[in-house]
Amino acid sequence: MKRDVPEEAVADVLLQLRGLGISYGQSDANERRWILRDLDLSVREGEFVTVMGSSGAGKSTLLNLVAQTLQPSAGRIAFRGKAVGGADMPPNPGSNRQIGYVTQDDNLLPWRTVWDNVMFPLMLAGKPSSSDVHRVRRLIEQVGLSQWTKHYPHQLSGGMRKRASLARTLAYNPPVVLMDEPFGALDAETRAQLQFDLLELWASERKTILFVTHDINEAIALGDRIIVLSGSPGQVVLERRIDIDRPRDPELIFKAPTFAGHYDAVRNCLRGAGHS
Amino acid sequence: MLLIAWEAVGRLHGAYWISSPSLVLERIWMLVLNGDLWFHGRFTLGEALGGFLLGAIPGCAVAMALRRHPFSRAAFLGVAAIGYAIPKTALVPLFILWLGVGPGAKVALVTAAIFFIVFYSTLDGVDAVDQKLLLSARVFGASESQLLRHVVWPAVVPYVFGGLRVAVPYAIAGAIVGEIISSNRGLGYLAQYGAMDFDTTLVFVSLVIVMLIVLSVSAVLSLIQKRLLRWQISQSQGARTVGA
């Protein structure tokens, strides 16, 4: 593995994956089909990590493992040093409400208005307090949906649904947010705006983000660090720190002096991976 | 147009075969005044409503309950297929044997017919619930009962209503058929009595009343449905999408 990041011995590691693997098939370990294998990753508190990889390299699977909607076949997941998932622990998504997950589809409940959708995770935990309501109101304002709280999801555009979905995930204030190609299906302009807004939200909310994308520009524009998954079974084949100053403008990220270097490194890695 | 044609044919050929709208209206008015209509109507309505509730609520509940139990589900579906295959009217003699010639047998007949309609449509709804919505709600920390209440149930409601709307005519029909087979009261009895007495008008009176009942119950259901499914209805009314 190519690494230009020193092996972390830092104390502020929030999320740690050790020897993580997932496989299908019941027989002995050698005959199973591994989707991901021996994956190590440490994510620091407040870090923005973008995950890239050839299709089928297990990017979404990685997020599902962290969200505990899938159970790993090997390895373990630790959150603030405490094991929360592993091959020997039954998966229990949402058990500790530490993880927010923005999936490719917005997954808004069609029978709830924007406001009720954003309140939904808070409502599940009990009667929302007035500070919750206040927080939700502020989040909805930050994603620019103040005028649309009483509308149903089908009355909104794709970009607006994405914003609502983002606000909903941030509403219950999970320290970790997983995002699976959230802006993949949007037009370029909406996408750039949402990237910009996401960076602002990330800066103000200090979330730790694991962001899957297939767009190198996006990965460089958003991330503190890019990891590239590849191969079958999928493993981390490149880890690269993005040293571009913040605040960044995602639309003009290509003007950054080190952009070309990052771009080429990631692209070569993805290409090489594609052929192997 | 149909009414005019009916009236015209009735006058030309004599009212013996098909009666006529004016005769039917006249007779309805008469039956309203002497209380007979209410007397018979309330039995039919009561049986239909009773059977409707006794069939629809368990039908819906069982389908929901089987959601996470594939084994019980397979077992129940096997039995249900047999129950569904039996023509319900063929069960009437059995019901009369068990429950007598009173309203009980008719309620049982209606229940048997309604249960399967609502059960199968609810089951379709349960199967059609978007798995991704369920999964994302679980990531938000939803418990099993919260999933049922906030994700499964709202998604199933349109299917339940689809079943209920199909079920309404069957409920009334079940009650009427039960009454025709054996009874001394109810709209079915009225029709049967009319036919035996060569009183065509009376037969048509009960037909018209039954039709009115079905239409008005369906209208009420459709109103409730519109209210419950505002999130869906507005799709056709205000299908506007706005830019981000």
Image (cartoon, coloured by chain):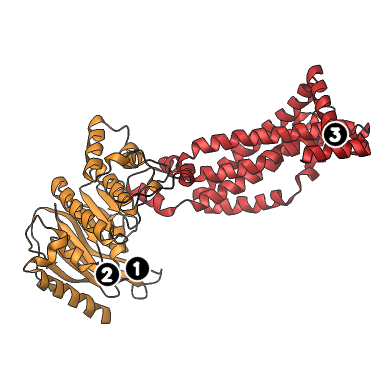
Instruction: Please tell me whether mark 3 or mark 1 is closer to you in this view.
Output: 3
Image quarter (top left, top right, bottom left or bottom right) of the N terminus of chain A: bottom left
* Residue receiving disc 3: B20
Q: Which chain is orange?
A: A
Q: Quadrant of residue A215?
A: bottom left
Structural crowding at the residue carrying mark 1, measured as other residues with C-alpha within 10 Å and reported as few (<14), some (14–19) or many (≥20)? some
Q: Is residue B124 left or right of residue A184?
A: right
The x, y position of residue A92, in whole percent, is: 33, 50
Q: CA distance from mark 3 to mark 1?
A: 76 Å
**Residue B95 visible to the viewer:** no
User: Do tag 1 and tag 2 residues touch (Cβ < 8 Å)?
Assistant: yes
- In the image, residue B79 lies at what x, y percent? 66, 51
Q: Secondary structure at mark 1?
A: strand
* Rendering colour (chain B): red
Residue type, label 1: Ser
Counting from the top left corner in percent of width and height, residue A125 is at: 32, 37
Please identify, in this view, whether the residue under mark 2 or under mark 3 is nearer the observer: 3
**Residue topped by disc 2:** A37
Q: Is residue A273 left or right of residue A46?
A: right
Q: CA distance from mark 2 to mark 3?
A: 82 Å
